Amino acid sequence: MVNDKEIEALGSILVNVEEPLRARFRALFTLRNLGGSAAIDWISKAFADDSALLKHELAYCLGQMQDERAIPTLVSVLEDTRQEPMVRHEAGEALGAIGNPKVLDILKRYSEDPVIEVAETCQLALRRIEWLLSGQEQWKDDSPYVSVDPAPPAPERSVPELRTRLLDESLPLFDRYRAMFALRNLGTEEAVLALADGLQCGSALFRHEVGYVLGQVQHEACVPQLAAALARADESAMVRHECAEALGAIGKEPCLRALREHLGDRERVVHESCEVALDMYEYENSGQFQYADGLLRLQGAQ
Ligand SMILES: [Fe+2]
Ligand SMILES: [Fe+2]
């Protein structure tokens, strides 16, 4: 039974800069799974931190919770230009995930943000809400994943056709994302290799989303492409971060090697991602009941 005290104990771990990042991540995921206004308040407080990795994950979790009480926090993060682009991006995407039309005006405004990742995110979030309003979400989504995605999967099933659309930079990002999520849902080696080709495309936002979905599919076929993107020093940190997490999710020996190599990366978001990815890997492979075990640990400590 979860009581306010336990939520408070988890929240205190989440906001405590003295705690190791991995413990704070586990507390965050437990709070996300518990939900409710107290959990949202604690997650909102943690935006005062200086780890972009942690803050972007806070915004991601608030979006995935799909609770409208998180809207004010997410709007203020999106508006705060002192926040890193990766964090503002995730706040915009989270507003799209919650899907309330009352944020349409704000998303329109930030669709023209000078930070391209933020602008593109808000354009996508707008399209998602408009799509929800069109009533098409009734259409059956056969996604095997529980995530709330920035675009619905395209209905097509042909990998060559979806690949062409994915890589066509003259198309709106929303349509290319639809192809991306359709390929992810197919999850075959051919589909995964098509997705990995997307790591060469022009938009950093697009490439980071490719990294994210490859982490969801967890197919070994794309390990060389993910490791190459992680190793590319001139690649955007947001993309390298997502590739690191995907490698952790796939968890084969070459993945772990690549992650260990970047534990001392110059880019803070990248070395923190490698640390968290290796921790998640260890947990998933140590017979632990679940990764988001903040509460279990808490109970164990009492
Ligand atoms: Fe993202
Ligand atoms: Fe991320």
Image (spheres, rainbow, N blue to C red):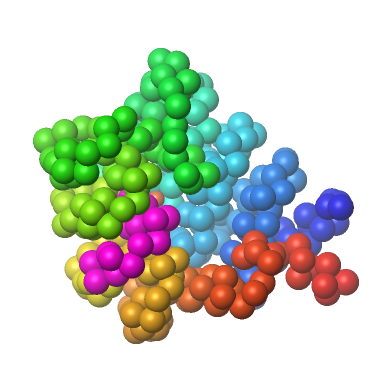
Q: Residue furthest top?
A: 134
Instruction: Write the residue at 69% across / 45% down.
Output: 35
Q: Quadrant of residue 131?
A: top left
Q: Going by the image, does 125 lie left or right of 55? A: left
Instruction: Write the residue at 34% across / 73% down.
Output: 267
Instruction: Write the residue at 65% across / 64% down.
Output: 290
Q: Going by the image, does 140 lie left or right of 22? A: left
Q: Quadrant of residue 223?
A: bottom left
The answer to whether residue 84 is seen in the rendering is: no
The answer to whether residue 11 is seen in the rendering is: yes
Q: Position of residue 262 (x, y in %)?
A: 35, 80
Q: Is residue 18 above or below residue 89?
A: below
Instruction: Write the residue at 88% across / 71% down.
Output: 302
Q: Is residue 53 magenta?
A: no
Depth check: give the residue in front, 50 or 140.
Answer: 140
Q: Position of residue 60 (x, y in %)?
A: 50, 48
Q: Which residues are the magenta region?
A: 207-225
Depth check: give the residue in front, 219 or 272.
Answer: 219
Could you tell me how many numbered marks the image carries? Answer: 0
Q: Position of residue 174 (x, y in %)?
A: 28, 33
Magenta-drawn stretch, dominant element (helix, strand or loop) = helix
Depth check: give the residue in front, 17 or 233.
Answer: 233
Q: Is residue 217 above or below residue 89?
A: below
Q: Is residue 223 magenta?
A: yes
